[in-house]
Image (cartoon, rainbow, N blue to C red):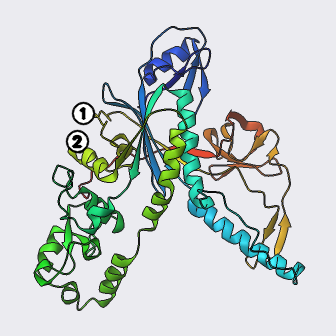
C-alpha cells in the first residue's frame, strides 16, 4: 500500500507513514482523518521531528499525467497517481456553446454588427482545453506540498528530441553516442502507433523499428519512413517495399501511409503546454529539474519496470536513483470532473431550448461531486456504500448508479472537482 500522509497539530507536513502505523494512531485516538482522498491524517498532539525531503516527479501527458513522490536518498516511491485530464470534454463543451450562441444570435439579433477586431489575447495564451491540463497539474502540486515535505520537482519537459527524430544517425551529439541512443525515436514511434504492430496489430510483444521503404532500396532513417512491427512481421517483410508487401491489402496500406504522415495530436498538446507548466512550476520557488522522454524510458527499461504513467513519472530526470523501489505502491487514479456548468437552459439535439435548470447547486446540504458514505438499512441495495454522489432537486440522489435518499448519507469530503479510484494491478508488458 502507498504511504499515508501525516500532518502535525499545526497542519505542517511530516514524513508519510505506513497504513499500519496510521491505523494504530487512529485506533488510539492520537490522530484524526484530515482528508480521505488522498488519505491524510492529522495528529492531535505536538511533535518535534525532522522530515526527509521528497522529490515530486511529473510526467505530463495529453490524456493522463503521471505524478510520483520519490525519496532520493532511499530510492523509495512513497506515493503515485495518474491524473486524467478532461481536455476533450472542455473542447466539445466550447464547440457546443459556440453553436448554441450562433443559433441564438441568428434568431434574436439577425442584423447585429460583426465583432472581430476587439478580441485581444494575453501573451502566452493557451486554449482552455490545453490550459486545463496545466491547471490540473499545478493544483495537485500545490495540494501535495501541503501534505508532504517536498523539496524539489522533476518534470519531463521534452517528450521527443526532434533533432534525433529527423536523423537518428546524427553524429557529434553526446547522448547519441551514449546509452540513450535511439530511445527518443523508439518512444516516438511507440506513441504514434499505439504500441502495436502496424501489420498484424499484435500487442504485449517485443516490437522492432521497421523501415517502410528498405535502406537497400533508397529508404532513409527519417521518422516518416519508420514504423514498428513485431519480429514475425518484420522478418516476413524483409527487404520488400511496403507497397509490394501489402499489395493485396490496399486498405491496410492506405491506413498505414496515412498514419505515418499524420501528426501526433497528443504530442502536440504536450508540446504546447510544456513551457507554460515549467514556468508555473518555477514560480513555486522549488528547484525544478527537467528531462526528456527518452531518458525517462531508459530509466524505466533499465530497471525493468512495466509501462505506467506514475512509474514513468518516478523515472523522470537524471536524479532518478539507481534502484527505485515501487513495491506495495497502490497508485490513485484522479479524474478531473470540473466544478459544474453555468448553462441554465438544456437544449435538445437540434439546439433549441428544452428546459431550465435550477440556479442552486446544493440540495439538503449536498452537491454533485461530494464524497459520501451511504448506510442503507434495507432493500436490494442494503449495506454500506462509498462514492461520489450526484444530486437532484428532490430527495433522490444517485450513488454508483443506484438511487439513495439523502437521510442515509454522511459527508466524507466536499467536492473538489476530482473523482478518485484505485488503479488496476500492473500487468507486465514487453511491448515497450
State left or right for residue 270 relative to residue 94: left
| Residue 112 image point, x, y percent | 87, 80
| Residue 332 vertical placement versus 32 (above, below) | below
Closest to the observer, 163 or 172: 172
The disc placed on residue 203 is: none
User: Can you say which quadrant of the picture contains the N terminus?
Assistant: top left
Secondary-structure class at tag 1: loop
Closest to the observer, 396 or 11: 11
Is residue 39 visible to us here?
Answer: no
Secondary-structure class at tag 2: loop
| Residue 79 vertical placement versus 431 (above, below) | above
Is residue 9 visible to us here?
Answer: yes
User: Can you say which quadrant of the picture contains the C terminus?
Assistant: bottom left
| Residue 402 image point, x, y percent | 66, 51
Closest to the observer, 55 or 205: 55
Which residue: 49% across, 15% down?
24
For label 1, count other residues whose C-alpha is less than 10 Å away and answer few (under 14), some (14-19) or many (20+): few
Q: Which residue is mark 2?
A: 303
| Residue 288 image point, x, y percent | 43, 38
Picture quadrant of residue 234: bottom left
The disc placed on residue 323 is: 1
Q: CA distance from mark 1 to mark 2?
A: 7 Å
Which residue: 52% across, 33% down?
285
| Residue 272 image point, x, y percent | 50, 59
Q: Are marks 1 and 2 in contact (CB under 8 Å)?
A: yes
Which residue: 57% across, 20% down?
12
Amino acid at each position: 500500500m502507498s504511504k499515508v500522509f501525516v500532518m502535525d497539530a499545526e497542519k505542517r507536513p511530516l514524513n508519510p507513514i505506513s497504513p499500519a502505523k496510521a491505523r494504530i494512531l487512529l485506533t488510539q485516538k492520537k490522530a484524526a482523518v484530515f482528508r480521505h482522498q488522498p488519505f491524510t491524517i492529522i495528529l492531535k498532539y505536538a511533535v518535534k521531528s525532522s522530515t526527509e525531503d521528497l522529490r515530486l516527479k511529473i510526467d505530463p501527458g495529453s490524456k493522463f499525467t503521471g505524478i510520483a513522490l520519490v525519496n532520493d536518498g532511499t530510492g523509495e516511491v512513497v506515493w503515485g497517481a495518474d491524473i486524467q485530464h478532461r481536455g476533450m470534454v472542455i473542447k466539445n463543451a466550447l464547440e457546443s456553446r459556440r453553436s448554441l450562441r450562433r443559433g441564438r444570435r441568428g434568431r434574436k439579433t439577425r442584423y447585429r454588427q460583426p465583432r472581430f477586431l476587439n478580441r485581444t489575447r494575453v501573451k502566452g495564451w493557451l486554449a482552455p482545453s490545453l490550459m486545463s491540463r496545466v491547471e490540473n497539474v499545478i493544483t495537485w502540486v500545490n495540494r501535495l506540498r501541503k501534505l508532504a515535505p517536498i523539496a524539489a520537482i522533476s518534470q519531463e519537459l521534452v517528450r521527443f528530441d526532434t533533432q534525433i527524430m529527423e536523423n537518428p544517425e546524427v553524429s557529434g551529439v553526446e547522448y547519441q553516442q551514449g546509452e540513450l541512443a535511439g530511445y527518443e525515436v523508439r518512444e516516438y514511434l511507440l506513441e504514434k502507433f499505439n504500441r502495436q504492430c502496424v501489420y498484424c496489430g499484435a500487442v504485449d510483444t517485443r516490437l522492432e523499428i521497421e523501415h517502410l521503404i528498405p535502406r537497400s532500396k533508397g529508404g532513409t532513417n527519417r521518422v516518416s519512413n519508420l514504423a514498428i512491427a513485431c519480429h514475425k512481421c518484420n522478418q516476413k517483410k524483409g527487404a520488400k517495399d511496403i507497397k509490394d508487401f501489402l499489395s493485396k491489402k490496399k486498405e491496410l496500406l492506405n491506413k498505414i501511409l496515412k498514419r505515418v504522415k499524420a501528426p501526433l495530436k497528443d504530442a502536440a498538446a504536450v508540446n504546447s503546454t510544456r513551457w507554460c507548466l515549467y514556468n508555473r512550476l518555477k514560480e513555486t520557488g522549488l528547484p525544478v529539474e527537467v528531462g526528456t522522454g527518452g531518458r525517462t524510458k531508459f530509466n524505466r527499461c533499465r530497471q525493468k519496470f512495466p509501462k505506467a504513467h506514475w512509474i514513468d513519472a518516478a523515472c523522470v530526470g537524471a536524479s532518478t536513483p539507481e534502484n527505485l523501489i515501487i513495491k506495495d505502491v497502490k497508485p490513485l487514479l484522479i479524474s478531473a470532473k470540473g466544478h459544474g456548468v453555468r448553462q441554465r437552459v438544456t437544449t435538445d439535439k437540434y439546439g433549441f431550448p428544452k428546459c431550465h435548470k435550477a440556479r442552486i447547486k446544493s440540495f439538503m446540504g449536498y452537491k454533485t461531486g461530494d464524497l459520501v458514505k451511504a448506510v442503507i438499512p434495507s432493500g436490494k441495495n442494503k449495506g454500506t456504500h462509498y462514492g461520489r454522489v450526484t444530486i437532484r432537486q428532490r430527495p433522490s440522489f444517485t450513488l454508483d448508479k443506484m438511487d439513495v435518499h439523502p437521510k442515509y448519507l454522511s459527508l466524507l469530503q466536499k467536492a473538489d472537482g476530482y473523482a478518485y479510484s484505485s488503479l488496476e494491478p500492473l500487468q507486465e508488458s514487453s511491448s515497450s
